């Protein structure tokens, strides 16, 4: 089957680009409005750092995509998390929009790993056997279902059904 990657950031990328484009103008405006040199320098440094962080986030969302290879489904969000689910554990996969608005990119709700983007998911994976996922400080959980967002859910469903 080979490696196939699937983006998940199409909903948030435009907002990041807007802020990235606005940041230099914001820095320039502060330079014109603020009379104190020490504050202008501080705001310039913060503006440059903000622009670098936004650019880094855009790069991370583009670089670290969901993937399907011959043995695993890889679910990612930038470098924040990277889950590997064996394809042998995938029982059923379907497409359908779900809105939970949990306020986190990853959560476990009633045995379901929810990886939402902008409060939504559009791919559902039912597992034949429970899988452990580590949510860091929120602990390790066993899940039997996974809901996640993909920019092209049809392609993800096709790749997982092969």
Image (tube, rainbow, N blue to C red):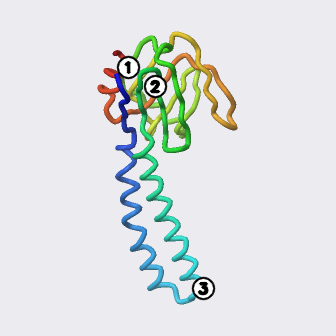
Between 96 and 155, the residue placed more toward the observer is: 155
Rounded to the nearest angstrom, the CA distance separating label 1 from label 2 is 8 Å
- Could you say which quadrant of the image residue 91 lies in? top left
At x 42% / y 38%, what residue is drawn?
Answer: 65
> Nearer the N terminus, badge 1 or badge 3?
3
Rounded to the nearest angstrom, the CA distance separating label 1 from label 3 is 56 Å
> Nearer the N terminus, badge 1 or badge 2?
2
- Residue 39 x/y as whole percent: 58, 82
Using the image, determine if residue 21 lies above or below residue 96.
below
- Residue 111 x/y as whole percent: 58, 19
In the structure shown, which secondary structural element does the residue marked by tag 2 occupy?
strand
Question: Which label was assigned to residue 80?
Answer: none
- Circles 2 and 3: CB atoms closer than 8 Å: no
What count of labels does the image hold? 3
- Could you say which quadrant of the image residue 133 lies in? top right
- Label 1 Cα neighbours within 10 Å, binned few <14 / some 14-19 / many ≥20: some
Question: What residue is shown with label 3?
Answer: 38
- Residue 98 x/y as whole percent: 41, 27
> Nearer the N terminus, badge 2 or badge 3?
3
- Circles 1 and 3: CB atoms closer than 8 Å: no
Using the image, determine if residue 54 lies above or below residue 83.
below
Question: What residue is shown with label 1?
Answer: 160
Using the image, determine if residue 145 lies above or below residue 9.
above
- Label 2 Cα neighbours within 10 Å, binned few <14 / some 14-19 / many ≥20: many
Q: Quadrant of the C terminus?
A: top left
Question: What residue is shown with label 2?
Answer: 73
- Circles 1 and 2: CB atoms closer than 8 Å: yes
Which label lies toward us, 2 or 3? 2
In the structure shown, which secondary structural element does the residue marked by tag 1 occupy?
helix
Between 97 and 49, the residue placed more toward the observer is: 49
Left or right: 10 as drawn, with respect to 110: left
């Amino acid at each position: 089957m080979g490696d196939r990657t699937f983006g998940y950031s199409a909903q948030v990328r435009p907002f990041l680009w807007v802020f990235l484009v606005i940041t230099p103008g914001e820095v320039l405006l502060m330079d014109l409005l603020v009379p104190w040199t020490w504050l202008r320098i501080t705001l310039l440094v913060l503006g440059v750092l903000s622009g670098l962080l936004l650019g880094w986030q855009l790069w991370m969302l583009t670089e670290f995509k969901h993937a399907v290879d011959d043995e695993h489904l890889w679910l990612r969000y930038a470098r924040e998390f990277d889950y590997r689910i064996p394809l042998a554990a995938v029982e059923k996969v379907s497409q359908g929009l779900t809105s939970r608005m949990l306020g986190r990119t990853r959560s476990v709700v009633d045995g379901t790993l929810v990886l939402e983007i902008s409060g939504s998911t559009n791919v559902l994976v039912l597992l034949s056997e429970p899988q452990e996922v580590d949510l860091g400080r929120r602990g390790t959980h066993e899940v039997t279902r996974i809901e996640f967002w993909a920019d092209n859910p049809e392609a993800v469903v096709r790749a997982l059904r092969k």
